[in-house]
Amino acid sequence: MDAKWLDRDRIDTEIRTVDFSTLIYDHDFGIYCCHGEPFTGVSCGRHADGKLQSIVHHAEGQITGVSVAWYPNGQIKHYSEMHSDTLHGLHMEWANDGTKSTEQRYRRGELLTA
């Protein structure tokens, strides 16, 4: 895991994103689209105060790559490595106080270690 993905302020200034609310989920094909095309890039969500809430990497409409979310207080909430909408790699979760609650590894959606 690259620690840069845990730094909300750094990501917010260095990564070009599209607001997640602008993506349309195509239920027939199971993909996220932007302007009628499968989306490739990084989407983000924001808390009510405008601070970054989450980032999600997409490739050809599927969630592929790093997905990260933060609590409103700025504390990391979860970090996941994904491939084709499936957990594939490291998945970690934290409580609102910063205590790590989960660390798991997946391969194509199958839990390897807990």
Image (tube, rainbow, N blue to C red):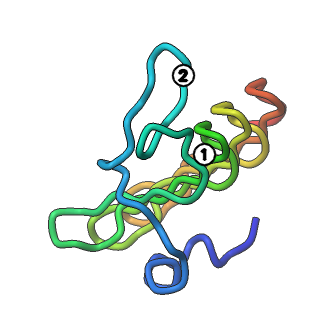
The image shows residue 100 at horizontal and vertical percentages of: 55, 57
| Residue at screen point 41% across, 69% down | 75
Q: Residues within 10 Å of mark 2 (few under 14, many from 20)?
A: few
Which tag is nearer the camera, tag 1 or tag 2?
2
At mark 2, the secondary structure is: loop
Extreme top residue here? 28
Q: How many numbered marks appear?
A: 2
* Amino acid on which disc 2 is placed: Gly
The image shows residue 67 at horizontal and vertical percentages of: 57, 53
Extreme left residue here? 48
Of residue 88 and residue 103, the one placed in the foreground of this image is 88
Up-down relation of residue 65 to residue 50 (above or below): above
* Amino acid on which disc 1 is placed: Thr
| Residue at screen point 73% across, 26% down | 109
Of residue 33 and residue 93, the one placed in the foreground of this image is 33
Residue topped by disc 2: 30
Q: Horizontal placement of 6 versus 25: left or right?
A: right
Up-down relation of residue 63 to residue 55 (above or below): above
Up-down relation of residue 10 to residue 69 (above or below): below
Identify the mark at residue 102; answer none if there is no mark.
Answer: 1
The image shows residue 59 at horizontal and vertical percentages of: 66, 46
Up-down relation of residue 82 to residue 26 (above or below): below
